Image (cartoon, grey):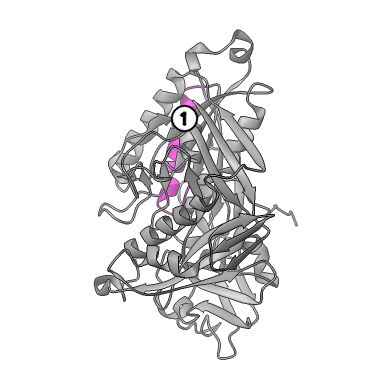
Amino acid sequence: MKLEIGNFYVKEVIFGEENSYKDGILTINKKEALDVVFEDEHITEADLVIAKPGDNIRIVPVKEAIEPRCRLDGRSIFPGVTGDLAQCGDGRTHALKNCSVLVVGRHWGGFQDGLIDMSGEGAKYTLFSELNNICLIADTDEEFEKREQQKKNKALRWAGMRLAEHIGNIVKELQPEEVEEYTFEAITKRSDELKDLPSVALVLQPQSQMEEQGYNDLCYGWDCNHMVPTLMSPTEVLDGAMISGSFMPCSSKWSTYDFQNFPMIKRLFKEHGKTINFLGVIMSNLNVALEQKQRSAQFVAQIAKSIGADSAIVAEEGYGNPDADFIATIVALEDAGVKTIGLTNECTGRDGMSQPLVSLDSKANAIVSCGNVSELIELPPMETVLGELEALARDGLSGGWADDELLGPSVRKDGSIIMENNAMFCGDRVTGWSTKRMSEY
């Protein structure tokens, strides 16, 4: 499979009469864009606001992030979700870089939503403070979940995907400034020189714990709770096969933007043919019952051995209960003779003294930490809030609270906040963006 991603590097996003892209300036007709949003009758109000790096803006509750893209062959950028089912990972896709569509609740947030500061101390905690964000701020008539802590957010998330494709189509007929090429050869057809290199498989564990449909990550539109581990081309992941869900404390979340740009996949491609033989992605899942966790771990180890993996990298989306899947998979791979490292965050408590993962094993002895979800973050007021700041305290966001006997409320009267890292949108960057490092004292 050969995927080409034609990149257009956005310097500025503005609203104007006609959709266009020229010299790094992306111009969007706001009315036409909102018409795409309102194609869903469940959207009751919506607006678009541009938030760029350095703006004195706080955005909350953020539900999703998507890179605007289009396919030159006319198929949907998210087959099985926003369009007919079709193969991802081959052909040409155009992408608007340095920008994203952020889906933001106008009023109501939930456990899975997060916060972004575009400047100041809070900006360092999330990648999205570095992007030109086209913020879709909207509300729906989905009354059945408005005051639920856990929300599916379907109308808003699907509106974000439609909007990202609408904006991506602005550059469909243009020549990109750069073309990334990712070629994934059939494993059995590779040269002897390539086969002689150490072989590596990437095991991904997207969020899929909810047995009710509508919350979990999707693979070609299929709820990941209903799948067993399967071998995928890494180009499929980069090309829209995976969609982020709506169930995960937010610093642990992998947004759709993360799947589209998965840094660990791109790094493995960079080393492919030089220092390693990249065998592809084993797409696993996260389960509820212990037997399900063990079954998936066995599937992963069997696939890894069958394709000849010498080593593996395992990355989990989440913490707590998913740690059992994460450790079980590492142990199963090690037992199968596959040397394995893990990528995850930790939940070590506000003082950093608790056990980092729910489940541990002596065979899981090479784990890269991407941060502590319980770390306290205190931030000053921001001039502008997109969405509703009270959502952080009121609606059960995973890092916020209405009141605390020691710390008081997450949202203070002057607009300053105190919260756990849990509420920072995609803040732990387990997919490979992380800028955090460990310090010994």
Q: Position of residue 214 (x, y in %)?
A: 29, 56
Q: The magenta stretch spans which residues?
A: 316-337
Per the image, the residue denoted by label 1 is 233
Secondary structure state at the residue bearing disc 1: loop
Is 348 on the left or on the right of 325, as rendered? right
Task: Name the quarter where the C terminus is drawn.
Answer: bottom right
- Residue at image position (59%, 40%) is 6
Residue type pointed to by label 1: Ser
* Residue 250 located left or right of residue 155: right
Is residue 357 in view from this perspective?
A: no
75 in relation to 2, above or below:
below
Q: Is residue 255 magenta?
A: no
Query: How many numbered marks does the figure carry?
Result: 1
Q: Position of residue 380 (x, y in %)?
A: 65, 81
Q: Which residue is rendered at x = 54% and y = 68% of the image?
A: 17
Mark 1 Cα-neighbour bin, 10 Å: few <14, some 14–19, many ≥20:
many
> Secondary structure of the magenta portion, mostly?
helix
In the displayed structure, 355 sits above or below 44; it is above
- Res 179 visible: yes
Question: Which residue in the rendered view is the most extreme toward the front?
Answer: 17
The stretch drawn in magenta includes residue 331: yes
Residue 229: image location, x then y, percent: 37, 34
The one of 263 and 354 positioned closer to us in this rendering:
263
**Which residue is nearer to you in this view: 190 or 286?**
190
> Residue 107, relative to residue 246: is it above or below?
below
Instruction: Tell me where residue 143 appears, x and y as whole percent.
Output: 26, 75
